[in-house]
């Protein structure tokens, strides 16, 4: 197995190499410190796993992804905290590690990357990532994991999400329903900055699709669905609708 580390700071490459030491007999490791080096090296070596820094001198890891010919690897970003980039990773369902990289976080991400199913639709997920990164103020796309891989949805097309134990049913404005292998809590956290509101333990709704609220405790959505708003959340719900 070949692991590539792309980072413009040698001490960061050294730190990841140290974390990879328990796997030394199973892997070949190579480091690249620039986008140009990484493009040539990755296209030649075709690594199994790539650790990719976001900022590479005056360029970015996204420049690398846009230019590399082969994306048949599992991808883990490494980055200092930057809210916008973190949201983009989450929306695209691509793994990331915050610097300085913690051993437990590293182990979790690395073990997951060893699973070949994590490569499923990587090109599509990277395209979602690049689209969201390049259009900060435009509508976002989201990668939704389900039993056959991933489905890619515009956030503005999601009407509501409904909990079903450890799964979530997502209903879109074109009348379709998708079942995601994530909890409703996952989507609540993911969509918190995009005018979605948890009205009930089982329901997360896009406030842009709310047409009315009735004082006996339910909201009506534009496609006619009537949903309960829990008593303790009614005041916050009315306020959130008024702030759109």
Image (cartoon, grey):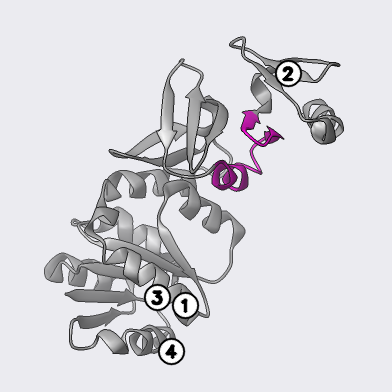
Measure how far apart labels 2 and 1 are at the Cα level. 43 Å
Q: What element carries label 2?
A: strand
4 and 1 marks in contact (CB < 8 Å): no
Q: Quadrant of residue 5?
A: bottom left
Spatial distance from mark 3 to mark 2, Cα to Cα? Answer: 44 Å
Label disc, if present, on residue 94 of the rendered structure: none
Distance in Å between CA atoms under marks 4 and 1: 19 Å
Q: Nearer the viewer, mark 2 or mark 4?
A: 2
Q: Which of marks 4 and 1 is nearer the N terminus?
A: 4
Label of residue 219 in the image: 2
Whole-number angstrom distance, CA of label 3 to CA of label 1: 5 Å
48 horizontally vs 201: left or right = left
Residue 222 quadrant: top right
Q: Residue 104 carries which label?
A: 1
**Residue receiving disc 4:** 11
Earlier residue among tags 3 and 2: 3
From the image, which quarter does the C terminus lie in? top right
From the viewer's perspective, is 102 left or right of 209?
Answer: left
Magenta span covers which residues? 184-205
Q: What element carries label 4?
A: helix
Q: Which of marks 4 and 3 is nearer the N terminus?
A: 4
The x and y percentages for residue 116 are: 22, 58
| Disc 3 target residue | 107
Is disc 4 surrounded by few (<14), some (14 to 19) or many (20+) residues within 10 Å?
few
Q: Assess whether mark 1 and mark 3 are in contact (beta carbons under 8 angstroms).
A: yes
Mark closer to the chain start, 2 or 1: 1
Identify the element where label 3 is drawn: helix
């Amino acid at each position: 197995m070949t692991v590539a580390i792309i980072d413009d700071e040698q001490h960061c490459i050294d730190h990841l190499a140290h974390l990879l030491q328990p796997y030394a007999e199973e892997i070949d490791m190579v480091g690249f410190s620039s986008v140009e080096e990484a493009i040539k090296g990755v296209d030649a070596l075709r690594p199994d796993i790539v650790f990719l820094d976001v900022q590479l001198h005056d360029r970015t890891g996204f420049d690398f992804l846009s230019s590399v010919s082969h994306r048949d690897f599992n991808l883990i970003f490494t980055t200092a905290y930057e809210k916008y980039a973190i949201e983009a990773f989450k929306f695209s369902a691509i793994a990331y590690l915050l610097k300085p990289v913690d051993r437990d976080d590293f182990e979790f991400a690395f073990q997951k990357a060893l699973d070949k199913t994590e490569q499923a639709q990587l090109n599509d997920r990277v395209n979602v990532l690049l689209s969201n990164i390049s259009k900060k103020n435009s509508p976002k796309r989201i990668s939704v994991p389900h039993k056959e891989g991933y489905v890619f949805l515009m956030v503005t097309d999601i009407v509501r999400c409904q909990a079903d134990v450890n799964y979530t049913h997502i209903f879109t404005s074109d009348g379709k329903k998708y079942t995601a292998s994530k909890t409703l809590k996952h989507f609540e956290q993911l969509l918190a900055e995009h005018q979605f509101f948890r009205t009930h333990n089982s329901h997360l709704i896009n406030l842009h699709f709310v047409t009315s609220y009735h004082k006996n405790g339910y909201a009506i959505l534009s496609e006619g669905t009537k949903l309960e708003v829990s008593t303790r959340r009614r005041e916050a719900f009315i306020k959130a609708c008024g702030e759109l």
